[in-house]
């Protein structure tokens, strides 16, 4: 491949998105026109086009129903109709929320720290990174102990060094897909703190000197996208010329980074095998760094305030603050910036949650996480599992259920969601997750343990491996509700 | 470099699956084609590598110190995955003539003791006999993806894809047309790669 002259494939997703916006849906004919233009086999364009849940085929989607995500259901919205894709509209701070996307309101920013401090008036973080040079900048990121905020908490400097060690042109990809129900913190950053994000992006570009920079934004997040595009236009002088915003067609699995790379390459959005890891061979075989929006915002804070100031908050192994999206039965739903290591109880209290005796449960980590009863709320929010039945810090989603809530309904909604969001590539997840959901719904049949084990140990990616969390945790803590 | 496979030192060349097969151990690998890079979709080559359950096709042998292909845990998980796989196939095709590898799936079910009726729900019921040389029976398809990779990456024809997602995923010629209306050249690579009788040669152009 000639660097700088990317294959036509790279234009497939933008062209599909454009056609979908224009017509309201895709057809065999409209995809055939695009495939012919890009000189792609039609079957390959079609398998990509038909794999995105937000792309309607042959007829427009029904007019957007009001949100029926878990937080909205807890706040009075009707239950999710069976068989429908992600009902969450990512406005859990506004529950019950209407269907339409809207700019993120400042009022939904709760506890604030370095990431949510008022947006920047200067670029001294970027200037500091420039003055430092690559090696010193990497050392500073290492000293700060920054770990990726997308949910996997991989050390950022290690990932970057891995890509640089390839000594080939690098691709920098920002994951702003944010497709996990109950999460809305990247939308908050892009909408209200876009300059902080841009400074982080500029710092990353300074250190990595990427050949190409792509920000992958959720196609339904129109307000966040507009804010980002305005900021990029206004501050184009800070960024490499190659910066490109690509909009996706939805799908929880896009949170998995190799799936995102396939989408950007115009391939079907399904996970790749690892190895090779993206840092070795990612986008079109380039060494590729994939970072989350929040990770880059944290970089800005590190270069503005210094590694020590960053380390002053958080845990020794996982320093810094994290943006938690807290919703459900809380008085102040929204984004709350809390030190990593904060307990679940303190996080819920920060959002004005009910007292523990009036709380039934919290779903920690979204559909890939698990439910915890108040007796477990002293668990610190750190990388990895909070409880071995499922709860994880992940990307920081916490949904609080008070004593009035229907826990069985909430758990079934999560297992149904995981079954529906399976990309279909690997057998354990495609075949196992719907059967696990059915077995769970039917009162935990004898097949359930085998299905859970096959999903956890046999799935190709984390989506399948973590799909049993809501089931296992609900059955473990509230067995009486599932008899 | 060597890797201990079920206690026997074996040269750690290629993937873990290569090493396991080189050691003379018969491990299912329904989506791994000798001619193609690993797909990693069927998850039937699960082994326990240094205590972790992994798909042997997708991990380099180098760097792994010991592999257990027969631990109770890995046998149980492999069997569950094979039962989920078998569930996609309509029963009663064992005697049907297919491509050169068409017996692979049923051999794997038998060898690993899979209860083929446990999770039965066939993938679909479409039958496509439009090609003059082969037929496609969806009710035997396990969505392993070998035919698609053979068509796209080996032959560079790209006549078929795995359209749609999740449980709706199907092997699909063009944008949902019969094989004969796609760019299929009837080269036969997909039939040769199929580990079931989903893709089967016709005896003559009139054979359904």
Image (spheres, coloured by chain):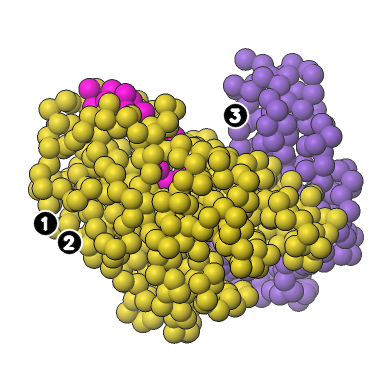
Mark 2 and mark 1 on one chain: yes
Q: Is residue B150 left or right of residue A432?
A: left
Residue A267, by quadrant, is bottom left
B149 relative to B125, above or below: above
Q: Per the image, is A144 magenta?
A: yes
- The x and y percentages for residue A397 are 47, 53
Chain for disc number 3: B
- The x and y percentages for residue B192 are 69, 53
Report crowding for label 1: few under 14, some 14 to 19, many 20 or more residues within 10 A (C-alpha): few
Q: Who is closer to the viewer here, B51 or A126?
A: A126
Residue extent of the magenta highlight: A136-154
B94 relative to A22, above or below: above
Q: Quadrant of the N terminus of chain A?
A: top left
Q: Who is closer to the viewer here, A203 or A163?
A: A203
Residue where numbered disc 1 is placed: A234
Chain A: its colour in the image is: yellow
Q: CA distance from mark 2 to mark 1?
A: 6 Å
The circle on residue A230 is 2
Residue A40, by quadrant, is bottom left
Kindly check if marks 2 and 1 are in contact, taking CB atoms under 8 A apart as contact. Answer: yes
Name the residue located 67 percent from the left edge and 51 percent from the top edge: A473
Chain B: its colour in the image is: purple
Is residue B49 visible in the rendered image? The answer is: yes
């Amino acid at each position: 491949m000639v660097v700088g002259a990317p294959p036509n494939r790279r234009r497939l997703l933008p062209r599909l998105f454009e056609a979908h916006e224009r017509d309201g849906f895709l057809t065999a004919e409209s995809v055939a026109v695009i495939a012919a233009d890009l000189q792609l086999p039609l079957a390959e364009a079609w398998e990509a086009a038909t794999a995105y849940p937000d792309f309607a085929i042959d007829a427009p989607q029904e007019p957007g129903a009001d949100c029926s995500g878990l937080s909205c259901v807890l706040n009075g919205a009707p239950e999710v109709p069976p068989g429908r894709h992600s009902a969450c509209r990512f406005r859990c701070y506004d529950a019950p929320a209407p269907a339409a996307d809207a700019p993120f309101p400042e009022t939904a920013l709760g506890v604030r720290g370095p990431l949510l401090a008022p947006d920047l008036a200067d670029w001294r973080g970027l200037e500091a990174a420039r003055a430092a040079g690559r090696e010193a900048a990497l050392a500073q990121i290492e000293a700060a102990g920054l770990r990726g905020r997308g949910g996997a908490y991989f050390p950022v400097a290690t990932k970057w060094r891995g890509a640089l060690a390839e000594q080939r042109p690098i691709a920098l990809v920002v994951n702003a897909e944010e497709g996990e129900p109950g999460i809305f913190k990247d939308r908050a950053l892009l909408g209200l703190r876009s300059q902080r994000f841009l400074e982080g992006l500029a710092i990353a570009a300074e250190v990595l000197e990427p050949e190409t920079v792509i920000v992958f934004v959720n196609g339904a997040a129109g307000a966040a996208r507009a804010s980002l595009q305005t900021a990029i236009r206004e501050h184009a002088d800070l960024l490499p010329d190659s910066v490109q915003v690509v909009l996706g067609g939805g799908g929880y699995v896009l949170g998995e980074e190799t799936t995102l790379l396939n989408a950007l390459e115009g391939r079907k959005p399904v996970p790749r095998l690892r190895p090779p890891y993206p840092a070795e061979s990612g986008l079109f075989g380039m060494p590729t760094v994939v970072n989350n929006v929040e990770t880059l915002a944290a970089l800005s804070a590190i270069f503005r305030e210094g590694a020590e100031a960053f380390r002053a908050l958080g845990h020794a192994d996982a320093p810094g603050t994290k943006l938690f999206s807290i919703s459900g039965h809380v008085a102040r739903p929204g984004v709350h910036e809390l030190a990593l290591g904060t307990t679940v109880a303190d996080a819920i209290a920060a959002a004005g949650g009910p007292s523990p005796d009036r709380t039934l449960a919290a779903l920690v980590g979204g559909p890939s996480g698990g439910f915890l009863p108040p007796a477990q709320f002293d668990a610190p929010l750190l990388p990895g599992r909070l409880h071995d039945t499922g709860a994880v810090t992940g990307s920081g989603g916490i949904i609080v259920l008070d004593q009035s809530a229907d826990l069985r309904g909430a758990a079934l909604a999560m297992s149904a969601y995981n079954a529906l969001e399976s990309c279909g590539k690997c057998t354990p997840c495609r075949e196992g997750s719907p059967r696990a959901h059915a077995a769970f719904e039917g009162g935990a049949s004898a097949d359930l343990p085998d299905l859970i084990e096959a999903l956890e140990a046999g799935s190709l990616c984390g989506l399948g491996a973590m799909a049993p969390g809501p089931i296992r945790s609900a059955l473990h803590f509230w067995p009486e509700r599932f008899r | 470099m060597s890797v201990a496979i079920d206690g026997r030192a074996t040269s750690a060349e290629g993937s873990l699956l290569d090493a396991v097969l080189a050691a003379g151990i018969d491990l299912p690998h329904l989506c791994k084609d000798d001619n193609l890079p690993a797909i990693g979709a069927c998850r039937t080559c699960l082994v326990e590598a240094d205590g972790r359950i992994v798909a042997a096709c997708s991990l380099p042998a180098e760097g792994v110190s010991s592999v257990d292909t027969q631990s109770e845990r890995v046998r149980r998980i492999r069997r569950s995955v094979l039962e989920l796989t078998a569930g996609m196939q309509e029963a009663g095709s064992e005697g049907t003539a297919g491509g050169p590898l068409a017996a692979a799936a049923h051999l794997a079910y038998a060898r690993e003791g899979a209860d083929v009726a446990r999770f039965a729900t066939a993938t679909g019921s479409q039958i496509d006999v439009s090609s003059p040389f082969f037929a496609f029976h969806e009710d035997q398809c396990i969505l392993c993806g070998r035919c698609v990779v053979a068509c796209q990456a080996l032959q560079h024809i790209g006549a078929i894809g795995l359209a749609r997602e999740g449980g709706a995923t199907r092997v699909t010629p063009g944008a949902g047309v019969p094989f004969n209306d796609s760019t299929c050249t009837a080269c036969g690579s997909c039939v040769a790669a199929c580990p079931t009788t989903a893709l089967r040669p016709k005896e003559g152009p009139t054979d359904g």
